[in-house]
Image (spheres, rainbow, N blue to C red):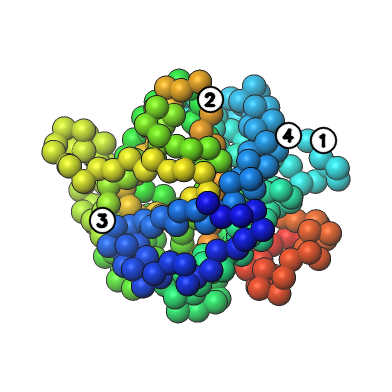
Amino acid sequence: MMEESTLASPNQYDLDLKLAELRINGYVLFEDLVPVKKIDRIREAFLPYLEQVRAHGEPENGVTLQGRSDDRLVFEGRLQVVNRYTLYVPWEQPFADPEIYENPVLLDFLDCYWGTEDYRITCYHSNNPYPGSEYQRWHRDAGISKLVPHVGLEVCPHFGVKFPLVDTYEENGSFEILPCTQYLADPEMETQYDEILEAGDFPTRRRLNLKKGTLWIQDPRTLHRGTPNRSDHARPELVICYSLPWFGQRVPIEMTQAEYDKISERGRRLHTTCRVI
């Protein structure tokens, strides 16, 4: 396990192999990339806001939680489906940590995949199944109509970079994915994946049982779903989205001038479309 002050180096990973795993499987894992003590601090700060959303959220209404130091950077969350919550995370400490969003392994990987440093952070949100949550439908993310292979894209222009705040396993609702389906593009099947995958034999289905400190990257075209949480605790996972400039902005990042002044030159290039308030 890494020491708290140690940043992982790209030389610790075979990036060519990791790139091949993403291109073939539709996702890739970087284990032991984030110090566990850092993850624990983030979880400790995050859970009270998640609990407030759970206490007040309704299926049809979003919830904005005020009471921050400047009353402008806020948590926004909603009940997505039964006992499964989505929150948008404010860009401030301890959540906006450069050892995560500007990790040299992550940025070197994205530089190599896209062949450029010209990409942006476009969203920061979280997925949170509570005890009693059920299966999601099998689905894709991020405006799949823009990403299907029929349009001839050489690379996927948008990734969710994810890191769980607890160890994930089948009891607490670990993520399930069907590898290689980022290249499946049959319009007639798009509304039937749930029925097809539950009725047929698809032995490549994989549960991603991940330990804290893992950072993983998902091609949003790859079929996936959340699974039931049968444990006695929430399973929070944070997601930082990275996109090529033309893909567009999903939920603009806001940060205070004080936070903006802290970030590096590379960090500012990652935030060229943020709102400084």
> In screen coordinates, is 259 left or right of 207?
right
Task: Residue type at mark 4: give it.
Answer: Leu
Distance of label 2 from label 4 (alpha carbons)? 22 Å
Residue ID at (14%, 36%) = 200
| Nearest to the observer: residue 25 or residue 257 | 25
Badge 1 vs badge 4, beta-carbon distance below 8 Å: yes
Q: Earlier in the sequence, mark 3 or mark 1?
A: 1
Residue ID at (43%, 43%) = 210
| Nearest to the observer: residue 275 or residue 240 | 240
Residue beneath disc 3:
180
Q: Quadrant of residue 259?
A: bottom right
Residue beneath disc 1:
67
Look at the picture and state if 2 lies above or below 191. below
Task: Residue type at mark 3: give it.
Answer: Cys
Q: Residues within 10 Å of mark 1 (few under 14, many from 20)?
A: few
Looking at the rendered structure, the secondary structure element under dot 2 is loop
